[in-house]
Image (tube, rainbow, N blue to C red):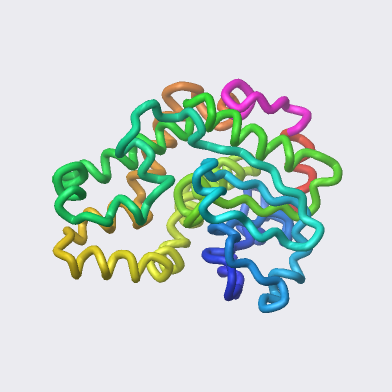
């Protein structure tokens, strides 16, 4: 689906209309993805108000939620599902997906820790952790469980930029609903224009200060290698999305059946 024209939510998209197996498609208006909602203004964004969002699943860390608290659509219930709550034990670069802009504050430090391909490797490692860390499994399991609830209504899930934690969530949902690999990849990469626009000021400041554009692109961009890392991890550990959802995320088949019945048109 094309990106929804919203002035106060970054990278807002409806998964509705995406093709699935058997000449079916994702039902419109039920599965929405975006960046953080800290600037949401329903009065200024009638398109957002018209969505009737009932459930908002926040995939961000406690620090992100504190620094940029969501402004929820009227009547929406919030669900916290911290993907990176205990995914990483280190205190430094390991949490890059949760603090994308701040790591670019010092070009010299960025070059030391993230130059020479380290940035892309770090993001690939992060995506693998999305699949197997305890906090990520709990968070994505909570997202799917919420979607299976009878009173869920239109559900929006988001992180900060809507590209990494949110990108994997969208990929899992599409695979579970019956999208093929090419379709999943296409949706994952479709956010590139919105992400580039959102991070253009940060990238401009970093490169103007002498920072390596490759580091900025690796951290703030959307690359096929990242999705591939998560998919390979899922196949290696679980053998496929069905077992990943059942055994890794702890979502029973009955809940998956309810999700499919609701979201497949």
Q: Which residues, given as a range, are shown in magenta?
A: 245-255
Residue 162's spot in the image, x, y percent? Answer: 51, 55
Asked if residue 67 is among those painted magenta in the image, a careful observer would answer: no
The single residue placed furthest to the front in the displayed view is: 66
In this view, the residue in front, 55 or 128, is 55
Horizontal and vertical percent for residue 45? 67, 75
Q: Is residue 195 visible?
A: yes
- 97 and 240: which is toward the camera: 97
Q: Looking at the picture, how far across and down is residue 16, in whole percent?
A: 67, 59
Q: Is residue 174 above or below residue 134?
A: below
In this picture, residue 4 sits left or right of residue 231: right
Which is more toward the observer, 182 or 22?
182
**Residue situated in front as seen by the camera: 77 or 19:** 77
Return the x and y of residue 260 as percentages of the image width and height. 73, 42
How many callouts does the rendering have? 0
Residue 24 shows up from this direction:
no
What residue lies at 25% left-to-right and 45% top-to-bottom? 119
* 8 displayed left or right of 181: right
Residue 46 location, quadrant: bottom right
Which secondary structure dominates the residues rendered in magenta?
helix
Farthest-out residue, right: 150
Q: Quadrant of residue 53?
A: bottom right
For the point 43% across and 57% down, the residue is 189
């Amino acid at each position: 689906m094309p990106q929804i024209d919203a002035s106060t939510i970054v990278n807002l998209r409806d998964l509705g209309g995406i093709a699935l197996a058997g000449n079916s498609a994702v039902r419109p208006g039920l599965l929405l993805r975006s960046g953080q909602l800290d600037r949401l203004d329903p009065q200024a964004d009638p398109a957002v108000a018209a969505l009737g969002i009932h459930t908002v699943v926040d995939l961000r860390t406690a620090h992100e939620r504190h620094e940029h608290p969501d402004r929820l659509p009227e009547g929406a219930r919030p669900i916290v599902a911290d993907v990176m709550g205990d995914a990483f034990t280190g205190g430094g670069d390991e949490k890059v997906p949760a603090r994308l802009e701040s790591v670019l504050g010092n070009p010299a430090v960025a070059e030391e820790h993230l130059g020479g391909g380290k940035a892309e490797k770090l993001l690939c490692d992060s995506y693998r952790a999305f699949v197997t860390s305890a906090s990520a499994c709990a968070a994505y399991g909570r997202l799917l469980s919420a979607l299976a609830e009878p009173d869920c209504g239109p559900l929006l899930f988001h992180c900060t930029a809507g590209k990494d934690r949110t990108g994997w969530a969208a990929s899992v949902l599409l695979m579970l609903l019956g999208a093929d690999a090419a379709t999943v990849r296409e949706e994952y990469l479709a956010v590139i224009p919105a992400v580039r626009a959102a991070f253009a000021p940060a990238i401009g400041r970093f490169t103007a200060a002498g920072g390596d554009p490759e580091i900025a692109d690796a951290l703030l961009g959307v690359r096929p290698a990242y999705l591939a890392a998560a998919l390979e991890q899922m196949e290696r550990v679980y053998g496929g999305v069905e077992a990943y959802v059942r055994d890794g995320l702890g979502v029973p088949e009955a809940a998956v059946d309810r999700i499919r019945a609701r979201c497949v048109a």
